[in-house]
Amino acid sequence: MRLLLMSDTHMPGRGRRLPDELWHQVDAADVVIHAGDWVGVELLEQLRGRARRLIGVFGNNDGPALRAALPEVATAELAGVRLAVVHETGQASGRERRCATRFPDTDVLVFGHSHIPWDSVADTGLRLLNPGSPTDRRRQPTHTWMTARAEDGALHDVLLHHLEHG
């Protein structure tokens, strides 16, 4: 099962549209995961119409329409992988411990908020992934998103994609 992970698109505003490369990934993915800060409902509607399956949450910059349409935390089992998605996880220091306590029955936690790509594993085995942002790189050198594959209860081939000019 092919997964596409993104977050912090901030559209419209910081980003006007998703990069073409990312739309190709949307078309190839079995599941698209968005970890919040959409800002406008247009991208949500576009992804709902184009993605085979969409899992998303609202972020701190998302208004009433997105908060009504999306949960704060989403969970799913994908090819035996127990997944959770949330926008904010707090400061980087102690993140693995906090998230392992908050999500004890989860294999992979996808989060956003910082726009900083992140891939780490807690002592409990919980893998934490932040795909960064494909449209608002802030202080990062590139725009980013992630792809991965879920199979037989494990996550494989996690790849951080970089786009120099978004």
Image: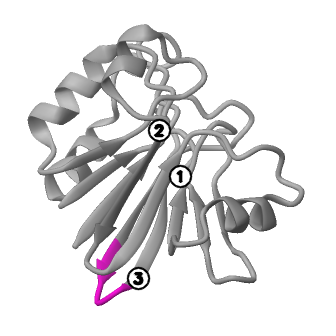
**Mark 1 — residue?**
131
Which of 151 and 117 lies nearest the eye of the viewer? Answer: 151
Numbered disc 2: secondary structure: loop
Confirm whether the magenta stretch covers residue 151.
Answer: yes
Q: Residue flagged by tag 3: what amino acid is it?
A: His
Q: Earlier in the sequence, mark 3 or mark 2?
A: 2
**Label 3 – label 2 distance at C-alpha:** 21 Å
- Up/down of 104 relative to 109, above or below: below
- What residue did someone put label 2 on? 134
Give the side of residue 55 with respect to residue 84, left or right: left
Camera-nearest label, 3 or 2:
3
Q: Residue at x 38, y 13 (%)?
A: 40
What x and y, as percent, mark residue 101? 72, 65
Circles 1 and 2: CB distance less than 8 Å?
A: yes
Per the rendered image, the range of residues in magenta is 149-153
In which quadrant will I find the N terminus?
bottom left
In this rendering, would 21 be left or right of 144?
Answer: left
> Considering the numbered disc 1 on the image, is that residue within a helix, a strand or a loop?
loop
Mark closer to the chain start, 1 or 3: 1
Q: Are marks 3 and 2 in contact (CB under 8 Å)?
A: no
Judging by the rendered image, the residue that carries numbered circle 3 is 156
Question: Which amino acid type corresponds to the residue marked 2 in the rendered image?
Answer: Pro
Residue at horizontal 77 percent and vertical 60 percent from the top: 98
